[in-house]
Image: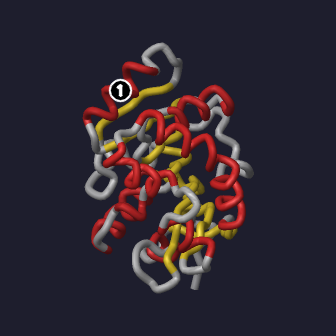
Amino acid sequence: VVANVALKDQNVLEINCGRGAGAAWCVHTHASHSYIGIDPSQNVINLCQRLYSTTPRLSFVVADATKHLPFENESIDIILCIEATHAFGEPVAIAQFANEVNRVLRPNGCLLWCDVCYMNGSGISVYDLIANGELIIEEKINITRNILHALDIQNKSRTDFIQRYIQSEEQEYFRLFAGLPGTQIYEDMSQGRSQYWRVVFRKKTTTNMLVI
């Protein structure tokens, strides 16, 4: 999702950063000016701060993106949102997230988004994020085949890890979470019931808007 957008010298915000490995990789690889990872879990943020306390330009903050992003208006150049919005739930939460993204992004700033979309209309839609009219879709690519290929490649290592380290009564949950072949997540994508998209949204500027 960052392939065609330069992060160097930009102020970057990652939504629901989890354990922070992706954030650390981005900072090391793309040399952003600053990189902030947020997550609603205090325990997760504590872990990130412990693991990456010595990494320059990288910080972590507890925040719920469906309620409020604790940043000033137009202070962020790029927002990364990877596999987060499908868990936001109600449409009102997704709408509030889109409003907050628009508020903190600078004009011409980008929301870099990846997630799964279900073809029956349940869950998040790409178009939910442009409903407020402030973001435009600059790039939209179906990468379902890429995702399935990656899951196939990782199948053995993930299966071995789960069998070795996860208690037997919890293994099926972790198989689902990992998207292993045979799970609902994998089969939905394989059978066309869901699709995995990567999208670059850009915040409108006055030059994007039609003058009447």
Q: What is the number of callouts on the image?
A: 1
Going 47% across and 41% down the picture, which residue do you hit?
162
In this view, 31 is above or below 183: above
Q: Which residue is mark 1?
A: 47
Does residue 69 show up? yes
Measuring from the top left, give residue 142's x and y in whole percent: 67, 70
Q: Residue at left 41%, top 40%?
A: 18
Query: Does residue 139 appear in this view?
Result: no
Foreground residue among 71 and 128: 128
Q: Residue at x 66, y 61 (%)?
A: 148
Toward the viewer: 199 or 138? 199
Q: Residues within 10 Å of mark 1 (few under 14, many from 20)?
A: some
**x%, y% of residue 111?**
54, 56
Of 92 and 74, nearer the camera is: 92
Name the amino acid type tagged 1: Leu
Q: Where is residue 17 shown, x and y percent of the image?
A: 44, 41
Q: Is residue 205 left or right of residue 29?
A: left
113 or 155: nearer the eye?
155
Q: Residue at x 34, y 62 (%)?
A: 88
Determine the image quadrant of residue 38: top left
